[in-house]
Image (cartoon, rainbow, N blue to C red):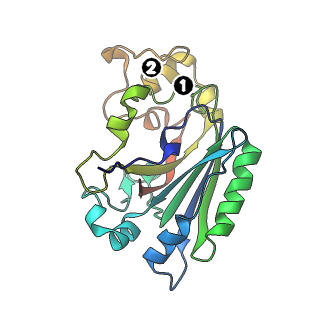
Amino acid sequence: MSFTLPQFGIFARGTQAHHFLEFDLRAGVAPDQAVASFRRLRTPDVSAGGVNVVIAFGADTWRTVAPSRAPASLTRFREVAGPEGGWRRAPATQHDAWLWISGSAPDLTWDHARAAARAVSDVAQLGAEQAGFTYRDGRDMTGFVDGTANPPSHRAADVALVPPGEPGEGGSHVLVMRWVHDLEAFNQLAVEEQQHVIGRTKPDSVELAEAAKPRPRISRASRSKSAARSSRSSAAAYRTEP
């Protein structure tokens, strides 16, 4: 009997600092060679001051290396554009590999991000990078609670992982997005109007009544188009290996 375990960092809790890196394979490097290099990355064996590392690969790389273990739903991210065009769009900025490094402090995640980039520099070059942090115990930059519809911790694996018996079991899909907000304009709105944009109350994240929610075709971005523009600036899709 064998067990397929997910990467532990996917479900790590209590991490305040994060670092995300996206890589492009170097010319002439075969996908299987690149995957082998990334799989050499290891988290430090320490009880304090360590980090979690999650590794993921784009659909093209994964299907080349392990076609039988690629979920049918795994595809490259395709650009999404609003019906009116213009700034309401999510451009596709697909890279080949993705690293998520999380830890207790930004200096730790920074140092490990630099070390990881050096470790795989023989097969891949850094294409994009973003540092992150936990804001007010889980709120986004607008001050509203983020992830209110996420399942409770004890059900997270049922939702996040490819089920046993299916291609890619134990792995997970990753949709990476970077948002750009006009926070100065958004914060000029009255809290009541902000709540109508988001659809929930700001202090305690209580869902608004249906009559008070934004109209179906109006998002948090477009509802405040003249005062609080918000747009997705890039997106890519990956799959983590178990």
Q: Nearer the viewer, residue 137 or 172?
A: 172
Residue 159: where, in percent of width, then height? 33, 37
Q: Quadrant of residue 122?
A: bottom right
Residue 145: where, in percent of width, then height? 52, 25
Identified by mark 2, the residue type is: Arg
Q: Residue at 49% x, 49% y: name it.
A: 177
Relative to 209, residue 18 above or below: below
The numbered dot on residue 200 is 2
Name which of mark 1 and mark 2 comes first in the sequence.
Answer: 1
Identified by mark 1, the residue type is: Phe
How many labels, in total?
2
Residue 169: where, in percent of width, then height? 31, 51
Q: Horizontal placement of 149 versus 72: left or right?
A: right
Query: Badge 1, how many Cα within 10 Å: few under 14, some, many 20+?
Result: many
Label 2's element?
loop
Mark pair 1, 2: CA separation: 8 Å
Q: Residue at 77% x, 46% y: name it.
A: 107
Contact? badges 1 and 2 (CB < 8 Å): yes
Q: Residue furthest front?
A: 1
Q: Residue at 35% x, 73% y: name it.
A: 64
Q: Which residue is mark 1?
A: 144
